[in-house]
Amino acid sequence: MVKFYNSLTRAKEEVPSHEGNVVKMYSCGPTVYYYPHIGNFRAYLFMDNIRRVLKYNGYKLDGVMNITDVGHLTSDADEGEDKMLVASQREHKSPWEIAKYYTDVFMNDAKALNIDLPEHIVPATSVIEDMIKFVEKLIENGYAYETSKGIYFDIAKFKDYGKLSGMNINEKLAGARIDVDEEKHSPYDFVLWVKAPKEHIMQWQSPWGMGYPGWHIECSVIGDKFLGETIDIHTGGVDHKPVHHENEIAQSNCHYGHQVVKMWMHLEFLQVDGGKMSKSLGNIYTLKDLAEKGYSAEDFRYFYFMAHYSKQQNFTFDAIEMAKNTLKSIKNLTKEHKNGTAVVDTISYEKEFLDCINDDLNMPKAIACVLRMLKEERSKDVYQTMMQFNQVLGLNLEEIEDDIPEEIKTLCEKRWQAKKNKDFATADSLRQEISNLGFEVKDTREGYNIIKK
Ligand code: AMP
Ligand code: ZN
């Protein structure tokens, strides 16, 4: 049985699902206004982890992730500047160009990390019509009201407001500063639809004049459109709990008149050198920054497994170095097992690995089990079990480089070209040269492998 920690009920629970073992899962996606950093990718590796573990257990996934390309202000509440506008001004590009560029960056990085992406990836701007209908229904049912600035959700109408993050809204209201917007019924009412000033860069026709959506509405609407009125799992970073997810719950539950998301799962933050990533400290790293320092996307993928998602994880260059080295030795050992001849009963490892991943994604423990198994006498049984575990790990275990020097790689490539050109004499002499330098080249169906002798 797969059990995950549900942040809403504060308990580990069996994973909910729909008919046919289908898990409907929603993940809050990136705001595409800048380069995503490794903290953001911890959130998507978390999503990947859930998806792969569920698939390993025989579930089918129906997953959705939004792409925020409109409406997200620099504060998660309704304050600050529009992030897309800030980027447009910074780069002298239209918001559409900004969104396209950073969506591509995100997708390329996600691919490099071998993230198992959801079945539907939906930009917020593609569902504006649906958002308008959704907001209209909330107004009709008395959950939202209009002011001169936009349409607001009336949180007093939703008794469970604050339940997810454990905040007592009445206490909070008592201590709240007087909101500058006197038209709002409560300072915590949040915007669903903003009436746009003429010069605003992104705006659409609506029953309330030209405008654009508030940030939170996209997730309720995309979830509704692609997954329907009950969603099994909803994921996001812990920063989303107190505002974005409270608002999503309020909108969605009031829209349907019942609870929409059964299980909420939250990921703790990635820290750098024991503190928050920040521009002023110059410690916001992207995958490209890591590559420049000699660490691959896959090294970072392995680094993710070293801590439990519910704990903060501290990024340091010592830690990623350790991840890189352990990953290298996992690959080498896997290769040795591939050629092994011993007989090893791997059933106890299979059971232990499954118990770990099904116990709220205990990856550090699952990895410890993997490392122990790899110490067994070299055996094809271990290799096969490793390949099975790799459905969850998603590592490129077949690509083993063995620290092959560039010089050798170039010689091997030359030999391969010579062979393709049927110049076997040159190919043979290059093979000899490679051998004299301590390496062996073995042809395979797809190409060749280089092995250190
Ligand atoms: P954003 O693009 O800002 O909407 O954030 C995308 C995702 O990254 C959200 O799920 C955030 O919760 C998550 N996130 C942002 N910073 C971090 C961090 N330092 N560690 C882990 N997750 C983060
Ligand atoms: Zn969201």
Image: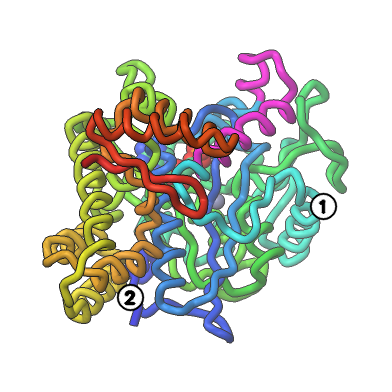
Residue in the picture at 52% in, 44% down: 111
Circle 2 or circle 1, nearest the eye:
2
Residue 101, percent across and down?
Answer: 65, 29
> Is residue 181 visible in the rendered structure shown here?
no
Q: In this rendering, would 278 be left or right of 233?
A: left
Q: Secondary structure at mark 2?
A: strand
Asked if residue 51 lies in the magenta stretch, the reply is no
> Is residue 204 visible in the rendered structure shown here?
yes
Circle 2 residue? 3
Disc marking residue 429? none
Residue range (magenta): 85-110
Residue in the picture at 13% in, 63% down: 372
Circle 1 residue? 129
Asked if residue 88 lies in the magenta stretch, the reply is yes
Q: In this rendering, would 344 be left or right of 226?
A: left
Q: Earlier in the sequence, mark 2 or mark 1?
A: 2
